[in-house]
Amino acid sequence: MNNYKHLMSPVRIGKHMIKNRIIAAPVTIHSASNGEIHPNEEAMNFFVQRARAGAGIVVCAGVKLLPVQDDGEHAGWDLYKHNSLNKLAELAERIHFYGAKASMELIGIFDDGYVASEGGLLMDMMTKGREIPISEMIRYKEAYAHCAEVLMKLGYDGILLHFGHSIPIAQFLSPLTNKRTDQYGGSFENRIRYLVEILEAIRKKVKDNMIIEIRMSANEFKEGGIDLEEGLRIAEIFQNYADIVQASCGMITPDLMCRTHPCDFLPPNPNVYLAENFKKSGRIKSYVTAIGAIGSLEDAENIIASGKSDFVAMSRSLIADPELIPKSMEGNSEDVVPCIKCMRCHDSAVYGHLFQCSVNPTIGLMHKLDKMIKPATKRQKVAVVGGGPSGMYAALTASKRGHDVTLYEKTDSLGGTLKFASKVDFKYSLDKFKDYLISQIEKSHVKVYLNNQAAPEQIKMENYYAVISSVGAVPLIPNIPGIEHCIHATESYGAEDRLGNNIVVIGGGQVGCETALHLARLGKTVTVIEMRSELAPDASITHRGDLMAEIIKETNFKHITNAKCSSVHKDSISYEKENKIHTLLADNIILAAGMKPNTDLSDSFAGISNLYWSTGDCVKARTVEMAVREGYFAGINI
């Protein structure tokens, strides 16, 4: 029985019948683009997989507008070189093979430091650019039309025009960022003029043969910028040229990335109301797309069925689980791997240049998996010591390959370091991932022994062929007088009611800041003491921006940087700053100085079996991403 009848209903747009309302949104697949002028096999496999999984429209990313344009980060496939067109045509046809429509994103980034008006920000949202002259605007307008026409001839059914998030071309639309004094600045009609000219030029070339979708910010969430009413006015004009208007939002500034790419500081599906505002205004007659961390087909179905939008665009959820659609359609939505909205995929370009996902360890390697993974040739006995995310993932992977797996966990429940997530309102997706792993263990053939502090002698007696050690990390205790008066950050979760109202946190890394923010939101006054000059330098780039934006808003959160804790007392701490000693009174003192791998315990399991792996925090205390990946690597190689 189809539980998604609204979501899966076909719809005709001009000459194109789209089989359902799911749009696979474009992704910059960093490591699958290495400067090639055409999509390589890695990129093709990524986008084709989305078609094979069942999306109605697959939007690829992406081509450069001009022959010289290449920002060195986004894919820059070349529509101007004849021999680069072959692979682009092949990509469209491989998407068509699965009944999906092929679309291509045209992103509005100018060359040579150009922005809409003097002083606007470039894509890094830090560097000020220079006003693009009209002669260059004409060149880019012609490039948009040329690219659309070439893509049409190559077999693409549509284009997505990225006119949102205050990227350089979108800056024309906003009264906050458009300070031009010519016919392209000032009034509403002037601000929208250039983008209308681009749309007119495109329509002249492709007529009604292509689906045109526009991504725009329906609300920039900045005073003086695009608000809901201004967004509606813009959409009213765009609908005269576009078939679909996508109601995105925000600006790609550190304080607003969480709005543009929603994280867990916001509730689920926080941006859908923007599409609903378009739909229910009575002023937008074109199709409307909702976007923003839509994580399940259940949510997508409710959005379409309730008339909030005509399409849903999904991106990160399809990275977390490329099989989200077929699993859900087959009635197995509980087996869908939940996206934890950590933005690791978005930030992949700055972390080893490998396309990454915290909950999908295969995402950067999908194009190689057929060669890398072979079924187990012999069923073996495998022991996994430690029931955290790394241990659970290792156990599941080894079990799926046909091995006889036993998991030992010293506490009375699985989850490891992820258990804290159930106590924190802005970690609800991480908590969902923890529950997902536990449920998968419960459904598997993995034997689980709780309250079992496995010792090497015990494991050796069972004669296991392979042992995977995932025993985690232990708190790092600095050599500070009186440090025994501290509560470790991991022990504070679940004990909030027993803590006083005036708290000091020693350590302003990501863990310390998130612990402090959590307690501050509960009404406690929290002061973070950090040795370095800034807070949370260990957090990933986008998450740090989200975290700092929340910290700034929280009046109960205080911090002192460039400060070194010198001693701890029962009800106070002393710290050194600028060669002076200061004292802070506190009801409780929480230590968040980091973790150290439990290497001694982990190493004790080495040499007692044919194969030995160590994974996760017992190798090095890091992120859930590395825990999952190393667990997968261990399980798949036994």
Image (tube, grey):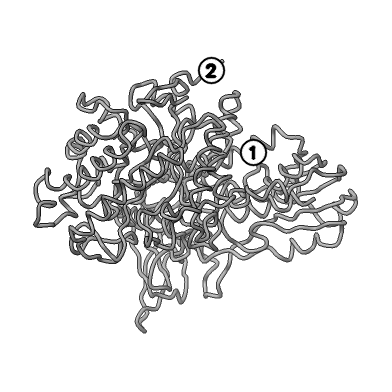
Could you tell me residue 117's position as x and y percent?
18, 59
| Disc 1: which residue | 438
| Residue occupying the point 39% across, 22% down | 12
Could you tell me residue 358's position as x and y percent?
55, 50
Give whichever of 161, 609 is nearer the camera: 161
Q: Secondary structure at mark 1?
A: helix
Residue 209 appears left or right of 9: left
Residue 487 vs 431, above or below: the answer is below
Residue 204 appears left or right of 46: left
| Residue occupying the point 39% across, 24% down | 304
Residue 263 vs 609, above or below: the answer is above
Mark 2 closeness class: few <14, some 14–19, many ≥20 residues within 10 Å: few
Question: Which numbered dot is residue 101?
Answer: none
Q: Secondary structure at mark 2?
A: loop
Q: Amino acid at mark 1?
A: Ile
Q: Residue furthest front?
A: 82
| Residue occupying the point 22% across, 32% down | 240
Give whichever of 493, 463 is nearer the camera: 463
Could you tell me residue 505's position as x and y percent?
43, 62
Of the image marks 1 and 2, the number of the one nearer the N terminus: 2
Q: Residue furthest top?
A: 1
Q: CA distance from mark 1 to mark 2?
A: 28 Å
Give whichever of 528, 249 is nearer the camera: 249
| Disc 2: which residue | 2
Residue 489 appears left or right of 245: right
User: Is residue 397 visible in the rendered structure shown here?
Assistant: yes
| Residue occupying the point 87% across, 59% down | 608
User: Is residue 515 visible in the rendered structure shown here?
Assistant: no
